[in-house]
Image (cartoon, coloured by chain):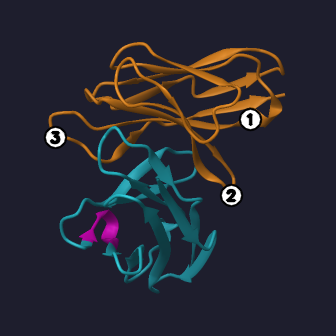
Chain colours: A cyan, B orange
């Protein structure tokens, strides 16, 4: 079984500051891990994914995430926040097989202050 | 390439009414999913279909039924709507296409209000 925990339902940063959104997972099989972004009144868009290749994954819009098996974590970072980054971010896990369930965390709303 | 298409985008129902949410994907994916999104609870899996002809319950299946009509289409039915089913519903599909997609592709969502 897989599950995801996102720490912090709301995160607020200043424009230009580091963004760090936390995600921890549990999985009985080698996981595939994902970060999605949702802008208001829109669907979910893939930011990046880890599929057992490089542990440091780079995504769109300057985001990246590092898979740390020892910590069962997949935290999302961006060196410098932009106003346009304000959105809700979801971490997700699957077993990697396209027949497996795909589980989401509860989401983190990122607020960027000018 | 339309991806995942959901209809309708908005719907208001009275308690006890029934309706079907439609979802279609054109990526030749095997797996399709229905989620509901509620504030502070993220996306919760209602039902999924790992392949054409199969369906399974997710985390919150009560009050819903699904049909995998063919490889492209996966519908969600509310037989007797309740106010607790007021939510945003997302359909998603994964994998099996030419590029062996591993991530979920989402529709734009259906905003359902039950009064």
Q: Which of marks 2 and 1 is nearer the N terminus?
A: 2
Q: Residue B89 is drawn in which quadrant?
A: top right
Q: Can residue B1 be seen in this view?
A: yes
Across and down, in percent, residue B59 comes to 60, 42
Q: Earlier in the sequence, mark 1 or mark 3?
A: 1
Residue placed under numbered mark 2 in the picture: B40
**SS state under label 3:** loop
Relative to residue A90, is residue B86 depicted above or below? above
Badges 2 and 1: C-beta atoms under 8 Å apart? no
Residue A37 highlighted magenta (yes or no) = no
For residue B63, side relative to residue A103 (left or right) = right
Residue placed under numbered mark 1 in the picture: B86
**SS state under label 1:** loop
**SS state under label 2:** loop
Q: Residue A34 is drawn in which quadrant?
A: bottom left
Say which chain tag 3 marks. Answer: B
The tag on residue A45 is: none
Q: Distance between the residues labelled 2 and 1?
A: 14 Å
Q: Are marks 1 and 3 on the same chain?
A: yes
Q: Are marks 2 and 1 on the same chain?
A: yes
Residue placed under numbered mark 3 in the picture: B99
Across and down, in percent, residue A95 comes to 35, 51
Q: Distance between the residues labelled 1 and 3?
A: 36 Å
Q: Which residue is drawn at 60% across and 78% down?
A: A12
Q: In which quarter of the image is the C terminus of chain B?
A: top right
Instruction: Mark 1: give few (<14), some (14-19) or many (20+) Cα within 10 Å.
Output: some
Instruction: Mark 3: give few (<14), some (14-19) or many (20+) Cα within 10 Å.
Output: few
Span of residues in magenta: A57-64
């Amino acid at each position: 079984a897989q599950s995801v925990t996102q720490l912090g339902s709301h995160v607020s940063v200043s424009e230009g500051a580091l963004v760090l959104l936390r995600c921890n997972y549990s999985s009985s099989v080698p996981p595939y891990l994902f970060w999605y972004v949702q802008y208001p009144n829109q669907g979910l868009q893939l930011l990046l994914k880890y599929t057992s290749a490089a542990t440091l994954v780079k995504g769109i819009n300057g985001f990246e995430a590092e898979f740390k098996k020892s910590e069962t974590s997949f935290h999302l970072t961006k060196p410098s926040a932009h106003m346009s980054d304000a959105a809700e971010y979801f971490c997700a896990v699957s077993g990697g097989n396209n027949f497996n369930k795909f589980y989401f965390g509860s989401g983190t709303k990122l607020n960027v202050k000018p | 390439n339309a991806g995942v298409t959901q209809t309708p985008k908005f719907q208001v129902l009275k308690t006890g009414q029934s309706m079907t949410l439609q979802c279609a994907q054109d990526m030749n994916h095997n797996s399709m999913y229905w989620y509901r999104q509620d504030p502070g609870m993220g996306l919760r899996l209602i039902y999924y279909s790992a392949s054409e002809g199969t369906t399974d319950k997710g985390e919150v299946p009560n009050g819903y039924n699904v049909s995998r009509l063919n490889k492209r289409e996966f519908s969600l039915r509310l037989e007797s709507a309740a106010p607790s089913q007021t939510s945003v519903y997302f359909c998603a599909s994964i994998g099996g296409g030419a590029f062996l997609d591993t991530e979920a592709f989402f529709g734009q969502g259906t905003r359902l209000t039950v009064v």
